[in-house]
Image (cartoon, rainbow, N blue to C red):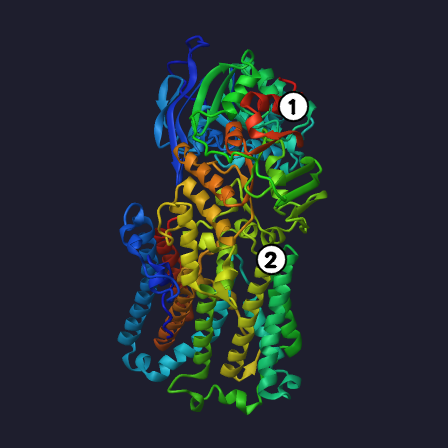
Amino acid sequence: MTQPATPARREGPQPLLDGGGTGPGPGPGSGKSASGDGGAWRGRIFRADVRTLSLIGVLAALALIGGLTQPDAFLAAGNLQLVLTQASVIGVVTVGMTFVITSGGIDLSVGAIVALASVWATTVATQEYGFAGVLFTAVIVGVGCGLVNGLLIAYGGMVPFIATLAMLASARGLALQITEGKTQMVTIPSVLDLGERDAYLLGVPPLVLVFAAVTVIGWLLLNRTTFGRRTVAVGGNAEAARLAGIDVRRQRLYLYLLSGLCCGIAAFLLIVLSGSGQNTNGNLYELDAIAAAIIGGTLLSGGRGTITGSVLGVLIFTTITNIFALNNLESATQQIAKGAIIVAAVLVQRRTTSTP
Amino acid sequence: MAPEPSLPEPSPPDPERPLLTMSGITKSFPGVRALDGVDLEVRAGEVHCLLGQNGAGKSTLIKVLAGAHQPDDGRITWRGDTVTLKSPIAAMRLGIATIYQELDLVEGLSVAENVFLGHEPTAAGFVVRGREARQSAAGLLRRLGHPEIDPARAVGELSAAQQQIVSMARALSHDVRLIVMDEPSAALDPDEVANLFRIVADLTAEGVAVVYISHRLEEIRRIGDRVTVLKDGRAVVGGLPAKSTPTREVVALMTGRNVEYVFPERPVQLPVGEALLTVRGLARTGEFAPVDLEVRPGEIVGLAGLVGSGRSEILETIYGARKPDSGQVLVDGRPLRTGSVRAAVRAGLGLAPEERKAQALLMLESITRNVSVSSMSRFSHGGWLDRGAEFTAARRATRELSLKPDRPAAPVRTLSGGNQQKAVLARWLLRGCRVLLLDEPTRGVDVGARAELYAVIRRLADDGLGVLLVSSEVPEVLGLADRVLVLREGRVVHTAPARELDEHRVLDLVMEGSPAS
């Protein structure tokens, strides 16, 4: 797992301490100000930490369960690589989804975009252009779908739920039309090789590296750039953001573009992983991604988002799947467990998140 | 359904015995005290008018009365018994019905279904007797003078006036003794208002009390019995006779000060020099007639007028949040693209809007981020934020305005109203804005913190900013501004240096030609 600093740190009581050397050090004023209603905001830092820590705790508990029930199989290096690889595809999608939800929106079309991008990038015609052709097509199809979503929502005034629901239906339909329901096998060796053990870097599969890179970039984008700030502002109070001089519509457009881009990248990862493109790819990814973001601590109503939480949410879900598979338990039980975790996580957050 | 059918019922109604007494009602929200020990006494069969400017506490008070808000302190007595209104249902059971300004009807349901929502006539406990409901609803609508409304129609298809009648029918479907009407005439044309008054008269003849909220003073004179005026969360006067009190006295109570504020000294001479902000012939149909004004560096220009005079609309149109039908806004002599907030901000305008929480602040975010949100490009290189520089600059701005507490990382929602306003001002100070548009800058600010805010605003002007100020409190405009424009019904009726005006003169100008003056 990547180790970006937790989002809690940016709320530190004296941001100068980790804010780089430009400003003067915390003067004597900072010290004496730690009184009065300080409890309120100190509590918030505490809560943010508790959220991240509790997710790590859940992950550790799951690892313990896995290790106890299947000591040999679960802890094998190969299994760890498998879990992380499986988490990569949905993880990349979830990073994009986290941005959209933080801005107060929703993207229901991610699974369908992954499917469409994966089949468009694996047609016989595309594969003639080799590795670059496949990668390029997957990304462009993803961004293109995101562009349509973004234009409809930001400039067409459509509700995100409806616009992306329409995209879900159309993209799936188009994917089916392209494949006619057949699996399109990848014939390009360099693409297939990426999924092979030989391509692992120090034991880390390339797909996991991509996931890690997307996570780090996503975290930096959300927490360290004006783009991230605008995203949070639009989600927290769109009217206030508009009156503060932020171009809310353009920001919304960019956000759905970003989600589409993530879907394109995820589609490429899926092509590498499965060695094929299918119109059934990415089934219900939208629900998995939303669930992971929500249990991670991103507010569905917008205004607060955490990439760290989202990634932990993805890892939790993937680990559950893995443990159940290793123990030969039915997928029915597994789904019930996932549902229970979502409910538990949201209940815990409601207790720890005070509404203003 | 009849509340407390026991003891007090048979005794003859005593007109002087209050039906409802609220005493010492206090209610605070984070950052502001909305009600500060309000008393209200309502008698059976009277029309009791509740008056006050925006933000005076009227909505909070009627929500307490409707059981939607729980008071922090105070006592409510209903027909001689102390009661707690734990929920809207509890209030309704006692016979208190509220008709809100934003009607709370379900548009997809029929008229009859809306009227009996929550207490439908049923068979076997759960089967709704539709025909019976429709018949009863038709009876109520007849009583309200609107037999033409079909009880089977969907509420969404009705006009606003008809929806209001449905809302009233819903109130009457309970055994109601007190009806609260929140600006019932706002959406009605004169004929419909006449019908509304007839209904109110019928109700009071039956002994029902009506608490009537309106901004239209002439209405209050026509149907009101007594008046309570709220200001800054306090009842400045209770139970004033509605018909014999001069309108001007009522207005003075609403717009006047109940504390002597210390206003900062004005510069000895009116600022001269090239206008920073010039507005030429700006107009929006139905909101305000062509407006011309100028603001010079160092000058505070005030817009005085009652609710509905177009004050806020003018400010928001200058800022680009509304698109004008005609006219121009110039900053430093250069015309702005109208209807674009971004163009206005880039040219150096900054707005502190009336609804601070809804329109200005990111309530989940820290002070720093609320201050820096309009200047992010200054602290970024290719989109990458220099958070150290951001923090330092934001803190410099908040310190300049003595924002308390001096903890830039504290969430803005933990601040008091006055300090939240300072955060908004710091945002524009940091941005380097040239003209500040202030819409009700002391709304929701505790009375004690206002003088400090006035001093801050004057200091910003002394530093060369132009300030355009809107306030519903006449003394605030007169005390703070250098020059005052008086508005009436969307028109500028008078312009003068503030020191040449006094409260009486402004009130005369504001009310001139209105039927009740």
Camera-side residue of A165 and B512: B512
Q: Position of residue A129 (x, y in %)?
A: 63, 87
Quarter of the view holding residue B448: top left
Residue at the image point whose x is 39% and y is 13% from the top: B8
SS under mark 1 = helix
Residue at the image point whose x is 49% and y is 64% from the top: B380
Quadrant showing the C terminus of chain B: top right
- Give me the disc on residue B193: 1
SS under mark 2 = helix
Q: Chain of mark 2?
A: A
Q: Position of residue A219 (x, y in %)?
A: 44, 68
Camera-side residue of B198 and B136: B198
Amino acid at pointer 2: Arg
Q: Which residue is mark 2?
A: A249
- Give me the disc on residue B347: none
Does the rendering let one see residue A339? no
Quarter of the view holding residue B386: bottom left
Q: Chain of mark 1?
A: B
Residue at the image point whose x is 35% and y is 46% from the top: B405
Amino acid at pointer 1: Val
Camera-side residue of A9 and B256: B256
Q: Residues within 10 Å of mark 2 (few under 14, many from 20)?
A: some
Left or right: B72, with B454 as reference point? left
In the displayed structure, B181 sits above or below A152; it is above
Left or right: A59, with B190 as reference point? left
In the displayed structure, B307 sits above or below B341; it is above
Does the rendering let one see residue A120? yes
